Amino acid sequence: MIKLTAFLLPTEFCDSDNFQIDTWAHMIIRGRGRKNPIEQAKLIKEWVQCHIKYRADFRNIKASETLDKGFGQCSNRANLQIAFLRILKVPAGYAVVGIKKELFKPTSPPEFYERISQPTTHVYCVVYDTKFERWRHFDLLPHLILHRALQKMGKAELRSHNSEGESKYKSEYLASEICIHSNIDHLFKIPPRWLNEEYIKKANRYLKNLEKENLEKGKLESSFEWKMLSPNPSGSCPK
């Protein structure tokens, strides 16, 4: 039996004991009936997918800071998912895996893409299902833009899915075994040497332009079904 205590505790960057994290986590699941941990994980995943945009950022960002910003990269968004789940007493951890850098070519400026390592590290959220004693995978889409761009390149669906909300990259896109951790603060403290504010701004301008282009062409749903999962009537994301 896996010892789950560490997968329920806050850390320096996964600050699940933060007041805003606590408030938003309970708002997201409120009014949706009594949910088991896996159903709660699905709701949290869907809410973060909708309301926290995929954008470049530094790794050493607390979950509460990502919530406040409303954007982040894979590790930031996963960190927020995990913080939400831990305050709800759902055991959640970090899946760390190497993936092929080519996945990010359609949505990266050339100078940014050239500096991405091969393979590159991907981080996503996993939840332990105590009923079936196994880890369940709740990886977010990097971005709907990326999904569309890869479809244009003739790529098949990147992730496997099931009705309970699980998703993860298919094996052909992985470059290493998946390792599960309760705490990766040591990784958050070591950002890529080349990453700085200038590169982040360039990457995010590039993403915003792609988003605008796709929206104008009607090829990207601007609302998507996850919009319905906002915990407040206005449908706005946290500021």
Image: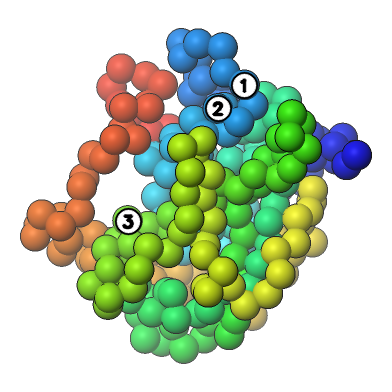
- Residue at image position (71%, 45%) is 135
Which of the two labelled residues, at mark 3 and mark 2, occupies the earlier sequence position? 2
Dividing the picture into quadrants, the one containing residue 186 is bottom right
Q: Which residue is the site of mark 1?
A: 36
Give x and y (percent) for residue 34. Answer: 56, 12
What's the residue type where badge 3 is placed? Leu
What is the number of the mark on residue 144?
A: 3
Q: Residue furthest left?
A: 217
Query: In this figure, which residue is indicated by the disc labeled 2?
Result: 39
Q: Residue at the location (78% across, 38% down)? A: 133
Q: CA distance from mark 2 to mark 1?
A: 5 Å
Residue that appears at 30% across and 17% down: 233
Judge whether residue 196 can be spotted in this image: no
**How are the residues colored?**
rainbow
- Could you tell me which quadrant the C terminus lies in? top left
Q: Amino acid at mark 1?
A: Asn
Q: In the rendered image, which quarter is residue 225 located in?
A: top left
Q: Secondary structure at mark 1?
A: loop
Q: Residue furthest front?
A: 132
Tags 2 and 1 touching, CB below 8 Å: yes
